[in-house]
Structure formats: structure tokens, C-alpha cells
Amino acid sequence: MAAILIDGRAVAAKWKGDLALQAAELSADGTEPHLAVVLVGDNAASQVYVRNKENACRKAGIRSTVIRLAEDCDQEQLENTVRSLNDDAGVHGILVQLPLPRHLDEAAVLRLIDPNKDVDGFHAMNSGRLMNGQKGFIPCTPLGVMKLLEAYDIPVSGKHAVVIGRSNIVGKPMAMLLLAADATVTVCHSKTENLKELVRQADIVVAAVGRAAFVTADMIKPGAVVIDVGINRVDGAIVGDVDPAAAEAAGYLTPVPGGVGQMTIAMLLHNTLEAVREYGR
């Protein structure tokens, strides 16, 4: 029996509709939500991602400003741009589009963002808040995954979750969120031995390794929930980290595209409105 496909587009559409109402209320109350995005260079994928974020903001009634810097801009110019956004009371959320050109110090730039405007949730202070169970901004993709599980009434408490990937953007915060929801969590990565055996024990699998069709059907416990965070381009097509054949074993599966991606943008809008409510008025 084929897996139930988790419709991320539909869930995200509902979120975006609700967020548009919230944004309208905030604007009517005197504060127009404002997200500023810093884009460095001409990376084609980054251009697409930023355009998608602009469109989502416009539809939700959130003001969006994109600051475009040249590919060869220096560290000082980029950091001064971030500082000016930190100091601008009319800007509630700041996002520096990644990846940055190689000559720029990405970690230094992320450290510079005001944690109370860090709607990507990448600042070390927000990472620490997540680790300690404190309120803060949560990275958008892991938060979106949790909201998808909630939308489909998929139980997490007491379940064994395996996260494949240990990045600061997805893998680590994903593990923290699942732990906070009372799952037992195993984090796997490129050096993990007996990976197939570990993944096959999982009730919930989150694949965030960045390799097309890395998770195969024989790695999936029958009936498991499989969340595919991967975005890989193969022969011009966008594919995930999970082999489509895994649908024959899984109970639930997020498709790529149409699964987690739209939720990531919805959670960015959510975090921006949270920034207004918590710090912006």
C-alpha cells in the first residue's frame, strides 16, 4: 500500500491565509510588519528563493525589502548593511540569504544579526534558547516539519525519530524540536556506521543529507513517517533525499516538490510576525 502523501502546499496555504489576517491586524494597530533580506551576488538559486520570499510577503501583507549587494562586496560593507538594519526600528526581521560568496565570513555575519530580528533562527543565542527550551526564533524548515506533523495528527511523543543530517540549519534544530516533543532521537550523518539498520528502526525519518535518493525503500520501516527535506537538482528536475520507491514502504511521505519547501516560507512569515509581537512595538 502506497504512503499517504503529506501535502505541504495545502498546509502552507492555510498558514499563509491565517498569517495574512494577523499581518492585517498588526498593520491596523499601527505596526506594519517588515522583513529585510540581504542578497549578495548573483547565485541563481538564491535569486529564486528571495523572489519566492518577496512574493509570499506581498501576498501576506508583509512589507519586504531586498538589499542587493555585489558579488565582490567586502566583509565591512556587508556587516555595515546588517548593522543598519539592526538599528532600524521599522525593520522587524532580518534575513541574510545563504550561501554567501566564499570570500565572506558567513559565521561572523550571522553573529552580527540582532537575535530579536533573527527570523531565520540561526544566531547562536536563538540556538541556545532552543537547546534550553526557552522562547526564541526556531529555524524555519525544522519548525515547518513539526507543523506538518501536527497538521496530519502524526504522534511524536514516545516515537523513535531518526534525523539524517547534522547541519545547524536543519539537522541539529530538528533533533532538538523532536526531543522537546518527547521523541527518542537518533542523529545520523556521513560517518554513521550501520546507517541502514538505524534508519530502519525509526518511526519517523527526517532526511536532510543533501544527496538525491539517498534514503532507499529498504531503509524504511513499514508504515514509518518519512519527511524529505532534501532539495537536489538532477537532470534539470528538483528531487529529494528520499528515493520515490520508499513510498511503497512508508506510511506517510512528504513529496519533493510539494512537501516541506512551502512550509519553510510560511514559517519565515510566522517568525516575522512573532518578531513584531515580541519586540517590534
Image (cartoon, rainbow, N blue to C red):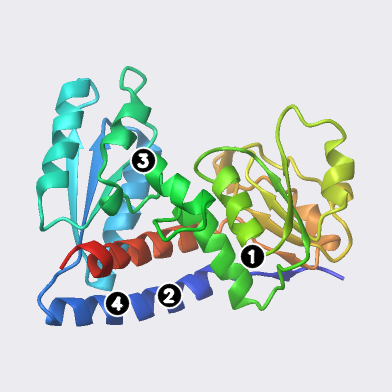
In space, the residues marked 1 and 4 are separated at their CA atoms by: 28 Å
In space, the residues marked 1 and 3 are separated at their CA atoms by: 32 Å
- Residue at 27 percent of width and 66 percent of height: 278
1 or 3: mark nearer the eye: 1
2 or 3: mark nearer the eye: 2
Q: Please tell me the numbered disc located at residue 213.
A: none
Three-letter residue code for mark 4: Ala
The residue beneath circle 2 is 15
**Nearer-N-terminus badge (4/2):** 2
The residue beneath circle 3 is 46
Q: Quadrant of residue 178?
A: bottom right
In space, the residues marked 3 and 4 are separated at their CA atoms by: 25 Å
Three-letter residue code for mark 1: Ala
Look at the numbered discs 1 and 4 and tell me whether their residues touch, using CB distance below 8 Å.
no
The residue beneath circle 4 is 20
The residue beneath circle 1 is 181
Three-letter residue code for mark 3: Ser
